[in-house]
Image (cartoon, rainbow, N blue to C red):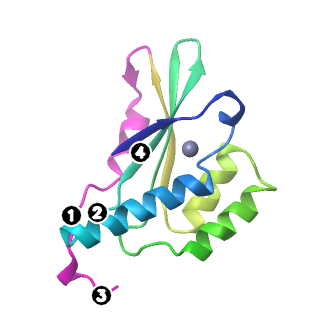
Amino acid sequence: MFVHTHPGEMVAYGPSGADLRVSREGRLERRHYLRYDLASIEIIVVDGGKGNVEMTIYQEPSAYLNSTSLIDQYEVDMSTNKTKQDALDLLKNYGYKAAIIRFTEGEFSPEDIDKLKSFEFKLTPLKMLKN
Ligand SMILES: [Zn+2]
């Protein structure tokens, strides 16, 4: 699981193309050195105001690695659709798991806990993968 923050001017946006590339490259590195596939769960934390913390969470599809051309396309699409919700919709179209959740008064809501449960922490030996 990897956590990073977005500065003020990026708070309204979803993950950047660079974020998606870092996630993909880390996955390729683990495949190379560990001989295991593990798609990291990435979290962008921003100040949600009024003492709340908002997290945008995303994860590459565990079934396949996203291509760099798909990530290039994401950047093109995001150059016109810039809200976090637009980013989430695009990511889901590309097979990512993606959600926005809030940590409010020290707690996650039951709905947000359900969203968290949809992310996978799964190590798969490469010899069991076809791609
Ligand atoms: Zn980022």
Q: Quadrant of residue 25?
A: bottom left
Give how far across and how far down residue 21 sits, in percent. 52, 61
Within the magenta stretch, is there residue 118?
yes
Cα separation between marks 1 and 2: 5 Å
Amino acid at the residue labelled 1: Leu
Q: Which residue is mark 3?
A: 130
Q: Secondary structure at mark 1?
A: loop
Earlier in the chain: of badge 2 and badge 3, it is: 2
Q: Which mark is residue 115?
A: 4
Labels 4 and 1 touching (C-beta < 8 A): no
Q: Secondary structure at mark 4?
A: helix
Residue in the picture at 50% in, 68% down: 95
Residue 24 located left or right of residue 123: right
Q: Nearer the viewer, residue 37 or 26?
A: 26
Q: Quadrant of residue 38?
A: bottom left
Residue in the picture at 60% in, 52% down: 88
Amino acid at the residue labelled 4: Lys
Q: Which residue is mark 2?
A: 38
Cα separation between marks 3 and 1: 15 Å
Residue in the picture at 55% in, 61% down: 92
Labels 1 and 2 touching (C-beta < 8 A): yes
Q: Which residues fall within the magenta stretch?
A: 105-131
Whether 45 is drawn above or below 27: the answer is above
Cα separation between marks 2 and 4: 19 Å
Q: Which mark is residue 123?
A: 1
Whether 1 is drawn above or below 106: the answer is below
Earlier in the chain: of badge 4 and badge 3, it is: 4
Earlier in the chain: of badge 4 and badge 1, it is: 4
Cα separation between marks 4 and 3: 29 Å
Give how far across and how far down residue 10 sits, in percent. 68, 36
